[in-house]
Image: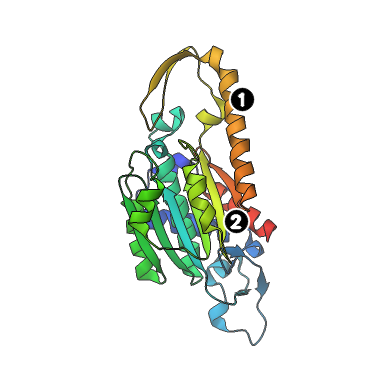
Amino acid sequence: MQQWIDPLTLSRVKDMPLVAKTVAEGVLHGQHTSVQKGSGVEFSQYRSYEPGDELGKVDWKLFARSDKYFVREAERESDTQIWLVLDTSLSMLQQSATSKAQGGWHKLDYARYFLATIAYIAQQQGDAVGVIGLSDERIDFLPCGTGQQHWHKLMLTLSQLTVGKQFPNKATLTQSLGNIHPQGLIFVLSDFMQRETEIVDFMQPLNYGQNEVVAMQLVCDDEVNFPYKGAIRVENPETKEQRLVSSSEVKAQYLAAYEQHQATLKSRLEQQNIALFRANIDEPLDKSVHAYLTSRSGRK
């Protein structure tokens, strides 16, 4: 049975490349013959070694774990470009009360390490990976590249991302990114807290040609379950507007509104043929990575 690493344990390890490698290899090697990479962060199967197979294709780490020889099957026609796009607006600093009390991750940190893990898997299989960080105060951009040196540049870019106030408007995006049109597999990580529909609108033109766009929504226990008691002060994380409310009076209304928001988001993305995957930052990172890759494998 898979043993997941709890978020608090990982949050205490500040070395992003180490965490990404540890989580990725734990997921990829956790079930012996069930995993390995193909084009675009895919799972394909290991197979048993046969006489005549190249020794370079033998997974020696898996041999050390299982004492059996397995060969990585590669089923790629060409390398894939993978773009990691991260919403760095202020609401991405949200974390649950439990996580905050224990010094755990907020959404932005969870997103960094999730993307770092995906980048490690992609780098291992030779895919080109790039990063875009988006807020109204700063646009971070690292072009797609391959190799160990580029992966370390990517880790540095992810670790240095800082939040702005809001998601950038169309004019800011056009001015900063110009005619850049990401191609390939495009991950967009966000909490999808929007003033209107700016994040969904940003994603729509990305879904053209052979592109595949994946929306990855980050949530936390508090916003999903609304566990509060008594009088509470609620704050809009981006506008800083505050209201004092009775939790018992607003809980049902909040949960209904939240459910409606989620349904509307899913519907709008489905209309654009964009897959939606949700990750709870209060759950183990390796569990979320495994769940995403498994769901992706099932779709394919």
Helix, strand or loop for disc 2: helix
Residue receiving disc 1 = 256
Residue at 36% from the left image edge and 68% from the top image edge: 150
Helix, strand or loop for disc 1: helix
Q: Is residue 1 visible?
A: no
Residue at 38% from the left image edge and 33% from the top image edge: 238
**Residue 256 appears left or right of 139:** right
Which x, y percent locates residue 18?
Answer: 40, 57
Q: Which label sits on residue 293?
A: 2
Type of the residue with mark 2: Leu
Which x, y percent locates residue 273?
Answer: 63, 53
Quadrant in the rendering for residue 148: bottom left
Type of the residue with mark 1: Ala
Mark 1 is surrounded, within 10 Å at the Cα level, by few (under 14), some (14 to 19) or many (20 or more) other residues, namely few
**Residue 81 appears left or right of 300:** left
Q: Is residue 198 above or below residue 94?
A: below
Q: Can residue 97 be seen in this view?
A: yes
Residue placed most toward the observer, 54 or 89: 89
Q: In this view, does 145 lie above or below 288?
A: below
Which x, y percent locates residue 190?
Answer: 47, 44
Q: Are marks 2 and 1 in contact (CB under 8 Å)?
A: no
Quadrant in the rendering for residue 128: bottom left
